[in-house]
Image (tube, coloured by chain):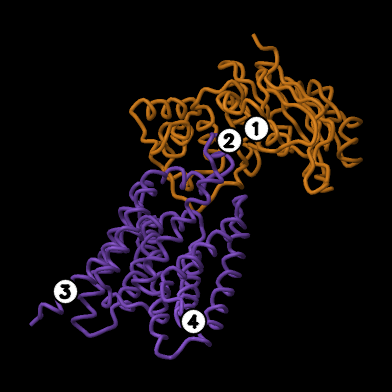
Amino acid sequence: MIFPAELSFIARALIGVVIASFVSAAIGHILTSRGITFLSAEVAHAALGGAAFGVLLQTLGFLWFDPLYGAFLFGVVSALITAYAGLRGSREQMEAAIGVSLAMSMSLAVVFLGYIRSEDMPKVWGYLVGDILLLTVDDLLFLGSMAILVGFFYILFRRELIYIAFDMESAEVLGIKVKFYHYLGILLAAIGVIVTTKALGAILVYAFLIAPAAAANEIAKRMYQIPLITLAIALSSGIAGLALSFTVNMPASGTIGILASTAYLVAILYSRFRK
Amino acid sequence: MMKYAVEVEDLTVMYNNIVALEDVNLRLYDGEFLAVMGPNGAGKTTLLRAILGMVKPVKGKIKVYGYNVFIEEEKVKHLIGYVPQKVTLSKAVRLTVEEVVLMGVLARKIPPRIPSERDVSTAMEALKIVGLEELWDRDFLELSGGQQRRVLIARALVSKPKLLLLDEPLTGIDVRSQAEIAAFLHELNRKHRVSILMVTHDINPVAEYVDRVALLFKKIHAIGKPEEVLREDVLSKVYGGRIRVFSYGRVCFAIIGDVHR
């Protein structure tokens, strides 16, 4: 029997999965198209470092500084460094910047953790492993409002973001403000990753934001189908993952990650056999 | 009527204190088909990028149909169709042929750039001009190299440009596709009166169709009719001694041991 209190946290987890699935549909399409899927791992780990920084500041008496501010600060700065490195459309330069930023973020996190009291550690580790079952109503409101922001800009500018990913030079010749959309795409991706990291944790974020979009890229025949298929895969693996975690008592985040990654493997096989 | 489609005057471009182009002077007449040839590193793509207003020169002026490309950018962009090198395209983006050609129409609209029925029919017309209307629904990445080039030409033609700039459109495709694209460009130039400036390191596929050839290596070393430029004594200035020219009817074949300077 499910008690009201349990129903409540299950409902919150479900809402969290639904919101994160919409973020996945937008962000996954942007990142797979640009060929920089590891940006999600970079930003998620930068958010982890930033959260550690925030907790450290609170320890030092700056109680107003929520660890989430630190996560946003580090995540956005890290993404903008990568965007600057790839301003001329070079994926190789962005990949290098992603690697360096990831290493820097993790190093900073380790340094900050050294100064944090052991009782405050769970606040930071929440960003690494996440727990969808611990989402509060405030978390959901924040996650939802950020998802609406990201979704709005994605729907409005998705063509520009895809055009610069496909052919940056011609997009510029055709009059598209390439530099603006380059930064906008990466900034939107960073915001999406940071808010999803808070719900799912840095490790699961990659599986949940990238695997459904990568699977959709294999299956879709037209551009507009990609976010829709991504949403369907993210939703189904998220909801099925939650259901499985309750029925066979598996950790929810890990189960969702396994299902999302499996969807990608199935999509590859489907794509190969279709040809 | 404007006499020149493109006027390049004393153009000098430098990258990190290295000269890419030096005192280049070049004029493309309205309705002319001009091929700019030269070895790798000659500055061919830089010249195109400068005409597109994407590279700021340290010296010189460029006009397209009388408009200064660095001041009247918007007017110039509406006059030019551009076909990039294939290597600049991403393989991570899945687009159909329709979506690629529509890019040429939608990029000129305001966000969210939703295609109207008219936009779709305009894109289809452009695809018909290059003879690939039956590939409308196909995945762009699954087409042959030659078909991809023609789709990119259709995208450039969709806005009915007066000037078409092509960057190595014949590189990396088979001989038959090269011949088809060369003949198509000739038809486009003669029938639709589109001025064409094409940069290439292999002049042979278009030698019989172009009005003039310019030989570029940092600066213009020669410009004139193909038979005037495709001569061993002229080409050897840029390519060194490793060059032979054979004539067959009206066609000249330059056999070049490619030089990487």
Please tell me the numbered disc located at residue A60.
Answer: 4
Q: Where is residue A34 in the image (x, y as percent from the top left)?
A: 50, 54
Does residue B33 appear in the picture of this structure?
yes
**What whole-number distance in Å separates the C-alpha atoms at marks 3 and 4?**
35 Å
Amino acid beneath label 2? Val
Q: B92 above or below B152?
A: below
Q: Position of residue A138 (x, y in %)?
A: 27, 68
Q: Mark 3–mark 4 contact, CB under 8 Å? A: no
Q: Quadrant of residue B95?
A: top left
Closer to us: mark 4 or mark 2?
Answer: 4
**What whole-number distance in Å separates the C-alpha atoms at marks 4 and 2?**
52 Å
Amino acid beneath label 3? Ser
Amino acid beneath label 1? Leu
Chain A tint in image: purple
Q: Mark 1–mark 3 contact, CB under 8 Å? A: no
Residue A184 vs residue B258, the one in the foreground: A184
Q: Position of residue A194 (x, y in %)?
A: 42, 66
Closer to us: mark 1 or mark 4?
Answer: 4
Name the residue tied to disc 2: A173
Q: B243 above or below B80?
A: below
Please tell me the numbered disc located at residue B117.
Answer: none
Name the residue tied to disc 1: B52
Which chain: orange?
B
Q: Which residue is drawn at 58% across and 69% down?
A: A101
Q: Mark 2–mark 1 contact, CB under 8 Å? A: yes
Can you name the residue that lies furthest to the left here? A1
